[in-house]
Amino acid sequence: MITPLDIENKKFSKQVMNGYSVEEVDDFLDDLTMDYTKSYKENSELKAKVEELEKSMEQYKTIESTLQSTLVMAQTTAEDVKKVARQQAEQIVNEAKDTAKQQVTELENQIILKKKELDDIKKQFDIYKAKMESLLISQLELIKDINKEDE
């Protein structure tokens, strides 16, 4: 690419006849040099800006990629946490059911034992009642005999 310095340093051979006016050519080259210098600077600045923007875009793409990865990881972690929570909940429920079954079984066994104790006490009471009845009858007979003797 031609630089502004190339334009400024360009020299034309002078022709004696029908040549261009050296002064006009120099003035034109000076104007061209200024315009081209301005365009060249703008072009350089724009290229630098484009390069800077491309770097920024790459950074943003990297950040976007990182955020997407983080989001996927967060979703996966959330699913894992939910799965573990469900498993723990199921385990707690199953343990509670097992504990309840054991308690019901223990209570049923206690009820059976208490019924046996009640039956034993009823039998003992019946025996005691029969003995008392027998004792009272014998005492009544004794009183009757004593009353017969006194008569």
Image (spheres, rainbow, N blue to C red):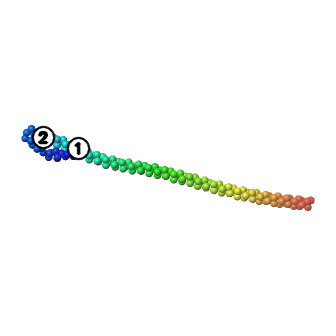
Task: Provide residue 110's location: percent of width, then percent of height.
Answer: 68, 57
Question: Which residue is label 2 attached to?
Answer: 25
Q: Nearer the viewer, residue 9 or 151?
A: 9
- Residue lying at 12% horizontally and 40% vertically, measured from the top left: 25
Quarter of the image for residue 37 reads top left
Amino acid type, mark 2: Val
36 up-or-down from 116: above or below: above
- Residue lying at 61% horizontally and 55% vertically, measured from the top left: 98
Quarter of the image for residue 149 reads bottom right
Q: Nearer the viewer, residue 116 or 56?
A: 56
Question: Which residue is label 1 attached to?
Answer: 42
Outermost residue toward the left? Answer: 16
Amino acid type, mark 1: Glu
Label 2 element class: helix
Cα gap from disc 1 to disc 2, whole angstroms: 25 Å
Label 1 element class: helix
Report whether 40 appears left or right of 118. left
Number of the front mark, 1 or 2: 2
Task: Provide residue 82's location: percent of width, then percent of height.
Answer: 50, 50
- Residue lying at 81% horizontally and 60% vertically, measured from the top left: 131
Q: Quadrant of the C terminus?
A: bottom right
